Amino acid sequence: MLTIWGRTSSFNVQKVLWLTGELGLAHRHIPAGGDFGLLDTPEFLAMNPHGRVPVIKDDEAVVWESHAILRYLAATYGRDRFWADGPARRAEAERWMDWSQTSLQPDFLNGVFWGFYRTPKPLRDMRAVAAKIADCGQHMRLLDRVLSDQPFLGGEAPNLADIPAGTVLYRYFGLDIDRPDVANVAAWYARLRKRPAYREHVMVPFQELEGRLEY
């Protein structure tokens, strides 16, 4: 059986659990990281020498790094729906995965979510936070233009393009920050919220993380 290690409040773990839900995969979930520990045990480090989650084991295959896991699960279990055979079609989704990881995720998760929400008020650098909020606004405007003529970032149906960026939306719209008027992004978010796997695995309360710098 597929086994997934990670805490459900982890953004990167949520990506994996969401896709697992979309694919209807039976799996065993082992809480790890944060208060659950396990990451520094010899057994876990033998799977991932970096001591980070998520990690999956599927039969004899061990995969770490969230986007590598997404690609593995999609290629193994989600052909046609989440994995295209042609490299050109795969690249249509993978470019958004890479953009999310290198642009959107650093600015929002590192700059806003960590710098604002997870940092205690006395320690916040609000000038830096404001700059990252503005950067996120630009990212959302870009997505709004792309979504002006298609319901999902992946096109007519959700695919791997939607998962990394879509996972951001629950926290982005849940924080008390300035946001631009991005009606197409809001409509995309509403469509994602109708998906049972999104509601179960992404719309996870994150209040436990407020003002908490440690994992």
Image: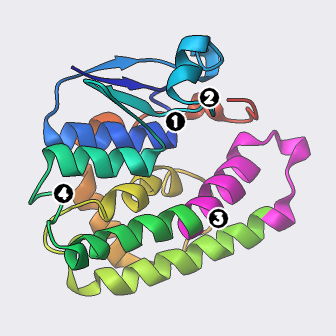
The image shows residue 115, relative to residue 140, as above or below, that is above
Q: Say whether disc 3 or disc 4 marks the residue closer to the N-terminus.
A: 4
The image shows residue 96, relative to residue 159, as above or below, that is below
Q: Quadrant of the C terminus?
A: top right
Q: Between residue 5 and residue 135, name the one nearer to us.
A: 5
Residue identifier under label 1: 10
| In the displayed structure image, the side of residue 211 where residue 191 appears, left or right | left
Q: Between residue 122 and residue 28, name the one nearer to us.
A: 28
Residue identifier under label 4: 82
Is 114 in the magenta? Answer: yes
| In the displayed structure image, the side of residue 49 where residue 184 appears, left or right | left
Q: CA distance from mark 4 to mark 1?
A: 22 Å
Q: CA distance from mark 2 to mark 4?
A: 28 Å
Residue identifier under label 3: 107
Image quadrant assignment for residue 152: bottom left
Outermost residue, right side: 122
- Residue name at image x 78 percent, y 42 percent: 119
Instruction: For marks 2 and 3, give the one nearer the viewer.
Output: 2
Q: Position of residue 127 (x, y in %)?
A: 85, 67
Q: Say whether disc 4 or disc 1 marks the residue closer to the N-terminus.
A: 1
